[in-house]
Image (spheres, helix red, strand yellow):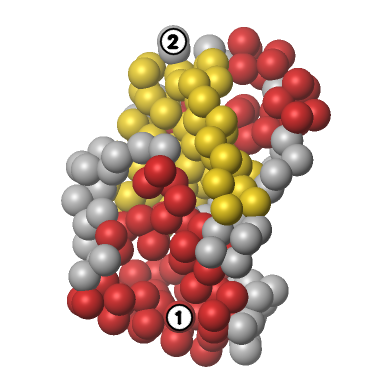
Amino acid sequence: MTSNQSQVFDVYLEELLKWNKKFNLTAITDPQEIKIKHFEDSLTILQAIKLTNQSVVDIGSGAGFPGIPLKIVCPEIKLTLIEATRKKVEFLKHVVSVLGLKNIEIIWGRAEELNKQAKYKEKFDVALARAVAKLDKLIGYCVPFLKPGGIFIAQKGPDIDEELKTAQKDLEKYGGSIKEVKNFRLSNKDQRKLIVIRKNR
């Protein structure tokens, strides 16, 4: 990470803490924990995919995770953030402007409605979701946004065996298959999994 990127992350942290006093953007309020559990966790996506100039949609973005940290370190991506809570959308618009990030679309809406619209359906190379819902639900929310051959990455905690089992039906329904499941630990030793799904048709 460049020193300029580190500075951008510092401003992001500052704004997040400031706004969090007014609206509940994150339950984590310790700056060091935010750096690990939000910033570092978001960037683990890069262990599963190389992001260059793809179109990326972050579904249920909340306070901007994982989309904004990825945009800071991979500025060439074309990023769309989808968030259903109005207050969080206001924060996203504010923070994107303060951080001077370009080529980001922020949409207030629900994924399950937007993914049927011609404007967004099958329009993205990569879809991301972090702890938004169970995997079977996420597949229905996220895979329709992808072009055939596109990749959906779900960020999960360590216990996902049951979710993987119940998701099989939805994978078939939406034309997806599991490419890999990556395991790793954050620097605080928390275990994480990335479920990488390819849209085949």
Quarter occupied by the N terminus:
bottom left
Instruction: Name above or below for residue 164 compared with residue 77.
Output: above
Q: Residue at the location (64% across, 51% down)?
A: 191
Q: Secondary structure at mark 2?
A: loop
Q: Quadrant of residue 168?
A: top right
Q: Secondary structure at mark 1?
A: helix
- Residue 63 shows in this picture: no
Q: CA distance from mark 2 to mark 1?
A: 39 Å
Q: Quadrant of residue 137?
A: top right
Q: Residue at the location (70% across, 44% down)?
A: 158
Instruction: Name above or below for residue 116 compared with residue 153.
Output: above
What x and y, as percent, mark residue 151?
42, 29
The amino acid type, in three-letter code, at marker 2 is Arg
Q: Is residue 16 left or right of residue 110?
A: left
* Local crowd size for mark 1, using a 10 Å CA cut-off: few (<14), some (14–19), many (≥20): some
Checking the image for residue 201, the label placed there is 2
The amino acid type, in three-letter code, at marker 1 is Leu
What x and y, as percent, mark residue 75?
22, 57
What x and y, as percent, mark residue 147?
36, 23
Q: Which residue is at the front of the view, 171 or 102?
A: 171
Instruction: Name above or below for residue 56 compared with residue 7.
Output: above
What x and y, as percent, mark residue 32?
54, 80
Q: Which residue is mark 1?
A: 13
